[in-house]
Image (spheres, rainbow, N blue to C red):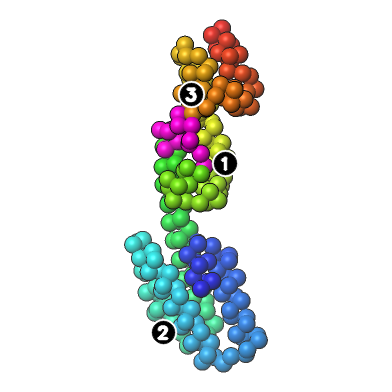
Amino acid sequence: NKLFNCISAGDFDKSMTVFTDIWNVNTRIYHISKDQLRFLLYDISGTLVRCAAVIAHIEGSERLIQRLSVDIERHTNPFEMKNACVSCMSGLCKYFAGEHSRTGLKIRNAVLDYIAAHYSDPTLSVELLSDVFGKSRTYLFSLFKEDTGFSLLHHINKTRIDNAKRLLRQSSLSIQEIAAAVGYNSAISFTRAFKKSENVTPSVFRECENKT
């Protein structure tokens, strides 16, 4: 359900909005009794238990549910039960957010490693990386934009240009050969991308580097 999805996403604000909506509809519109409220909160606590089962491997998550179970059984006042659910929900969201952050970091580093190893492949693209890692283009875009401030395509282009600069400085390869070595299909497309990045053509860059 919606509450489960929001908690699993690690988004406490959205989880709290959903929880509050459920509470308000039942107390202000349907005016359910205290006994019915307690049953509602038992049902919500069941959702929290299901969420905790997803991250049962994380140390500390089980304690949240144990504490919730104790609090739910101990309290008879629905408002105290509600506070116990909110406290548990907050803790679960923190665990999920941390888990998503760690997973995202692993994926980001793996993608960067893949780019570093395959930048010379002219078929390397966001679409290819999406297929290789089984993640949508939207997910990869958000992951890199949020973590680095730049798009995934920027990282591909930067890796290619950085390696082209290295070859321009350290080798006697022609512009055509360097273009092919860093993943461009032609010297024209390489020169265009290089100038966009460095504000000079590869030839001018090499001349300037040779003078220093």
Looking at the image, residue 142 sits to the left or right of residue 91; the answer is right
Using the rendered image of the protein, determine whether residue 198 is visible from the camera's viewpoint: no
Q: Please identify, in this view, whether the residue under mark 3 or under mark 1 is nearer the observer.
A: 3
- Residue 52 lies, in percent from the top left, at 40, 69
Mark 2: few/some/many CA within 10 Å (<14, 14-19, 20+) = few
- Compared to residue 162, the image places residue 105 above or below, namely below
Segment tinted magenta in the rendering: 114-126
Q: Residue at x 55, y 24 (%)?
A: 186
In the picture of the structure, the residue carrying the numbered disc 3 is: 180
Label 3, secondary structure: give it: helix
Provide the residue designation for mark 2.
Answer: 73
Amino acid at circle 1 = Ser
In this figure, which residue is indicated by the disc labeled 1?
151
Task: Work out whether 35 lies above or below 86.
Answer: below
Asked whether, in this view, residue 183 is left or right of residue 208, the answer is: left
Residue 79 falls in image quadrant = bottom right
Q: Is residue 127 magenta?
A: no
Mark with earlier residue (3, 2): 2
> Sequence order check: which comes first, mark 1 or mark 2?
2
Measured from the top left, where is residue 2 in percent x and y?
Answer: 54, 71
Q: Label 1 vs label 2: CA separation?
A: 49 Å
In the rendered structure, does residue 123 fall within the stretch colored magenta?
Answer: yes
Q: Kindly identify the amino acid type of the residue bearing the numbered disc 3.
A: Ala
